[in-house]
Image (spheres, rainbow, N blue to C red):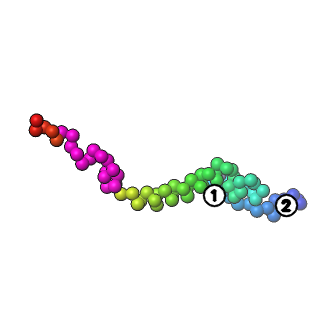
Amino acid sequence: MSKETAVNKQTVLRCPTCKTLVTAEDDHFPFCSDRCRLIDLGKWASGAYRISSEVLDPGVLEGLNPGSGRPKDDDDGS
Ligand SMILES: [Zn+2]
């Protein structure tokens, strides 16, 4: 009986990644494992990457291509 009371006093949250119940005593709290923490961090990282990639314009990449503006067969008048 007293054991159950102690369990109820613990801080218990669900892992944001896989929804597993995690107690505050866990090393990876509020995640259930280091893997789930990395997955959650990855979500934020990929979101930031999407925002920065919107700045890139396809035309900029084409301008960086040295062969796009010069046809190779321009010396056919020999
Ligand atoms: Zn998890």
Query: Per the image, is 70 magenta?
Result: yes
Query: Per the image, is 32 magenta?
Result: no
Q: Earlier in the sequence, mark 1 or mark 2?
A: 2
> Which residue is painted at 69% across and 52% down in the image?
32
Q: Quadrant of the N terminus?
A: bottom right
Question: Which portion, as a residue range, is magenta?
Answer: 58-73
Q: Is mark 1 within 8 Å of ligand 1?
A: yes
What is the x, y in percent for residue 42? 56, 53
On the image, numbered disc 2 is attached to which residue?
Answer: 6
What is the x, y in percent for residue 12? 74, 60
Q: Quadrant of the C terminus?
A: top left
Label 1: state its secondary structure: loop
Specify the amino acid type for callout 1. Pro
On the image, numbered disc 1 is attached to which residue?
Answer: 16
Residue 67's place in the image compared with 56, above or below, is above
Specify the amino acid type for callout 2. Ala
